[in-house]
Amino acid sequence: MTRTDFTLHNDLLGEVSDAFAARRKPIYALGVILFALGVLAVALPIYSTLFVGIFIGWIFIIAGIVRFLWFVRLRDFPGYWWLLISSILFVVLGLLIVARPMPGLLTLTLLLTFVFSIEGAFALLAALDLKKHSSGWIWILISGLVNFALVALILSGLPATASWILGIFAGVNLIFFGFSLVMFTAAIPRKSPH
């Protein structure tokens, strides 16, 4: 790498770091919101299977909309398209669940498994995009790996666990994604003065 290449590379990294630093508060707020929604999902779905289906559907709709609204503003954010697509998938799954919550908890569980698989893949792809820009990428990677672990646990316990696993695992998913955003934000360097 020549001295000019090195200078350009450092300048680009500085600009990316500044872009992340400028968005520190919105990313952190999104992480806190998703974490709180996850705690709610873990705490409440034990009351009835119908409530679980409708509750999880609305959690997915709200989380998807919140994620979409936050990420749509971050067009220059690495992993933008992967995070935006996973937000849309959350909304679509939530609408399907709310529209028909009781045709079968097994079907609902399998849909959730599919979404966790897709979101896990998108989180891994987003983490690879973020790796160049921040040491906090590892938290997004961990979030994706947790999704794959949830998929394995869901599939290993079917059909017996279908009645209670939805709320617990959806909550764990939201908690880990929210936590990963908070930790990613903590790793973003403060905006450098110019």
Image (cartoon, rainbow, N blue to C red):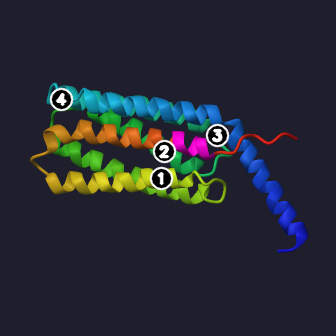
Of callouts 4 and 1, the N-terminal one: 4
Label 3, label 4: how far apart the Cα atoms are: 36 Å
- SS label for mark 2: helix
Which residue is found at the position 15% from the left and 26% from the top?
A: 48
Q: Taken as a whole, is the magenta stretch helix, strand or loop?
A: helix
Residue at the right extreme, as displayed: 4
Question: Do callouts 1 and 2 mark residues in contact (Cβ within 8 Å)?
Answer: yes
Of callouts 2 and 3, the N-terminal one: 3
Residue 16 relative to residue 87: left or right: right
Which label is found at residue 46?
Answer: 4
Residue at the left extreme, as displayed: 160
Counting from the top left corner in percent of width and height, residue 42 is at 28, 33
Residue under label 2: 180
- SS label for mark 3: loop
Figure check: 79 above or below 19:
below
Counting from the top left corner in percent of width and height, residue 32 is at 48, 31
What's under tag 4, amino acid-wise?
Ile
What's under tag 1, amino acid-wise?
Ala
Residue under label 1: 123
Figure check: 13 above or below 2:
above
* Magenta-colored span: 182-187
- SS label for mark 4: loop
Of callouts 3 and 4, the N-terminal one: 4
Label 4, label 1: how far apart the Cα atoms are: 28 Å
Rendered-image quadrant of the N terminus: bottom right
- The mark lying in front, picked from 2 and 3, is 2
Label 2, label 3: how far apart the Cα atoms are: 17 Å
Residue under label 3: 74
Count of numbered circles in the view: 4
**Magenta segment: does it hold 183?**
yes
